[in-house]
């Protein structure tokens, strides 16, 4: 799976589960992941085109979502609301998976850049 696909899957989960939480609980804070999901989703075309700046911004927002979901998880666990724990856990899991794919794509891009630089220096006329 590519980073863009993992990010898009995360967007779908954030929006769908956030809306599910809103319908179930009626709490407006359930719409926060929906908003973040829509913003990250708007970045997806840039991620697909391997735009570094957009990809790094999407990673930052995804990490922010993952960290921010810690408080609702803690609250749901303390209150014994298993449905909320499942919803928040699902959003956290999809965000963590998206982050893993982003990091893997960043590492692959760095390796490709290093290999290209190595090939370029080996082919230059002054290295014979």
Image: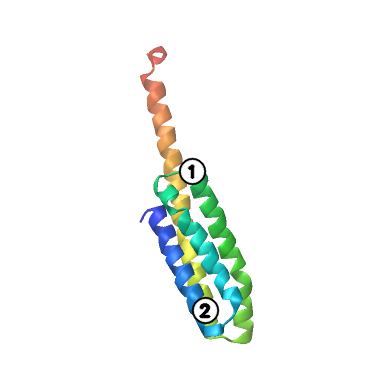
Real-space CA distance between mark 1 and mark 2, rounded to the nearest whole angstrom: 33 Å
- Asked whether residue 103 appears in the rendered view, the answer is yes
Say few, some or many: other residues with alpha carbon within 10 Å of mark 2 (under 14 / 14 to 19 / 20 or more).
many
Residue 21's mark? 2
Q: Secondary structure at mark 2?
A: helix
Q: Nearer the viewer, residue 90 or 127?
A: 90
| Residue beneath the point at 40% across and 15% down | 127
Q: Secondary structure at mark 1?
A: helix
Circle 1 residue: 52
Report the side of 17 relative to 65 (left or right): left
Q: Position of residue 90 (x, y in %)?
A: 48, 72
| Residue beneath the point at 35% across and 56% down | 1
Work out which quarter of the rendered image holds the C terminus and state it: top left
Q: Quadrant of residue 25?
A: bottom right
Residue 82's mark? none
82 to 99, vertically: above or below: below
Q: Position of residue 24 (x, y in %)?
A: 51, 84
Say few, some or many: other residues with alpha carbon within 10 Å of mark 1 (under 14 / 14 to 19 / 20 or more).
few
Q: Position of residue 88 (x, y in %)?
A: 53, 74
Say if mark 1 contacts mark 2, CB within 8 Å. Answer: no
- Asked whether residue 73 appears in the rendered view, the answer is no
| Residue beneath the point at 60% across and 81% down | 77
How was the colour assigned to the protein in this rendering?
rainbow
Number of numbered discs visible in the structure rendering: 2
73 to 82, vertically: above or below: above
77 to 114, vertically: above or below: below
Q: Nearer the viewer, residue 31 or 17?
A: 31
Query: Which of pointers 1 and 2 indicates the residue nearer the eye?
Result: 2
């Amino acid at each position: 799976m590519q980073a863009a696909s993992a990010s898009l899957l995360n967007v779908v989960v954030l929006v769908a589960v956030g809306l599910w939480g809103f319908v179930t609980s009626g709490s407006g804070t359930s719409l926060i992941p929906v908003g973040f999901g829509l913003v990250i989703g708007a970045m997806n075309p840039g991620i697909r085109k391997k735009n570094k700046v957009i990809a790094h911004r999407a990673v930052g927002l995804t990490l922010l979502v993952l960290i921010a979901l810690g408080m609702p998880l803690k609250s749901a666990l303390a209150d014994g609301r298993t449905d909320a724990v499942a919803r928040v856990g699902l959003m956290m899991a999809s965000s963590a998976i998206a982050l893993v794919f982003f990091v893997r794509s960043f590492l692959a891009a760095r390796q490709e850049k290093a290999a290209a630089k190595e090939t370029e220096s080996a082919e230059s006329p002054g290295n014979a």
